[in-house]
Amino acid sequence: MPYTSVWAIPAFHDNYIWVVQRASAVVIVDPGDAEPVLSALQSQSLDLCAILITHHHWDHVGGLQRILQSCPVPVYGPAVDQARIPQISHGLAEGDHIELSEVGLSLDVLEVPGHTLDHIAYYGRCDEQPVIFCGDTLFSAGCGRLFEGDAATLHASLLRLAHLPAATTVYCTHEYTEANLRFALAVEPDNPQLQQHRDKVRELRSHNKPSLPTSVGLELEINPFMRCDQPTVRQAAQTYQQQRQLESSAEVFAAIREWKDHF
């Protein structure tokens, strides 16, 4: 059976457009910019089979129309946002399942609102490896900003991701890791896993290599937004939020999300 690979097309300043490839067949995720996608398809003689969309922000959908003019393929995305993203041909909601056999992908749809209210993620298997394409909900050592949802909503979405198998490979869409690690170390300066990962990411980025993908297991060790139940994170959040006692992990999350916004 042919091997499936996942690789990134860089776009804009810090976006990654993920490409899932088996032989010459590819599926792409969140193509905000058409030019690098069309260039890769042409230069590598690739056959685009489908497009996956996680949410409506322009840097995730801006390339759709141009790509579809050259490659009229199915576009999967959040059903609630088909008015905002008219190119979506297959609207999806929680519990939906899609099979993209051309590239060996079997995916379930998770609704993970907070960054935006329409945000979905695609969780499943790629050659038996658990994978998730999570857009801007979860970043390595960070999470998305609250553009439409509130802190409690995004916290609940991240808890869903935290309960996925630790081996799940996480494909998020921005190269924010170095900046996120600086904040994470402000929250947990004595976390040895954070310190080690900072050094690894510095080395990767010094050679212009991606810091992604990450994994659920790694994020549970280094990501303060996934560690709101940990005493060290709780204490740091309490020190930042001095006005009142933080009673729950959701309140801890809200405090560090506000802290990160002003970091």
Image (spheres, grey):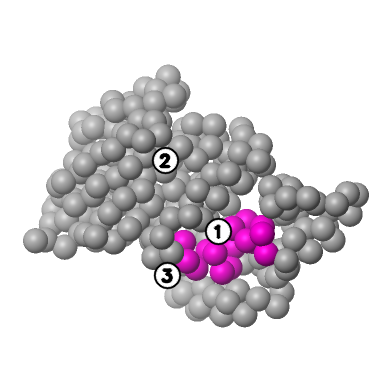
Confirm whether the magenta stretch covers residue 242: no
- The image position of residue 73, as x and y in percent, is 21, 33
Q: Residue at x 85, y 52 (%)?
A: 245
Residue 129 in the figure: left or right of residue 103: right
- The answer to whether the residues at label 2 and label 1 have Cβ atoms under 8 Å apart is no
Q: Name the residue tied to disc 2.
A: 110
Where is 68 relative to 245, above or below? Answer: above
Range covered by the magenta-colored residues: 214-230
Q: Which of the pair 166/151 is nearer the observer?
A: 166
Farthest residue, direction left:
1
Residue 198 in the figure: left or right of residue 41: right
Label 2 residue SS: strand
- The image position of residue 182, as x and y in percent, is 66, 67
Check disc 3 and give the amino acid type: Lys
Check disc 2 and give the amino acid type: Leu
Q: Earlier in the sequence, mark 1 or mark 3?
A: 1
- The image position of residue 166, as x and y in percent, is 43, 64
Label 3 residue SS: loop
Check disc 1 and give the amino acid type: Tyr
Q: CA separation, marks 2 and 3?
A: 29 Å
Q: Name the residue tied to disc 1.
A: 176
- The answer to whether the residues at label 1 and label 3 have Cβ atoms under 8 Å apart is no
Q: Name the residue tied to disc 3.
A: 209
Where is 64 relative to 164, above or below? Answer: above
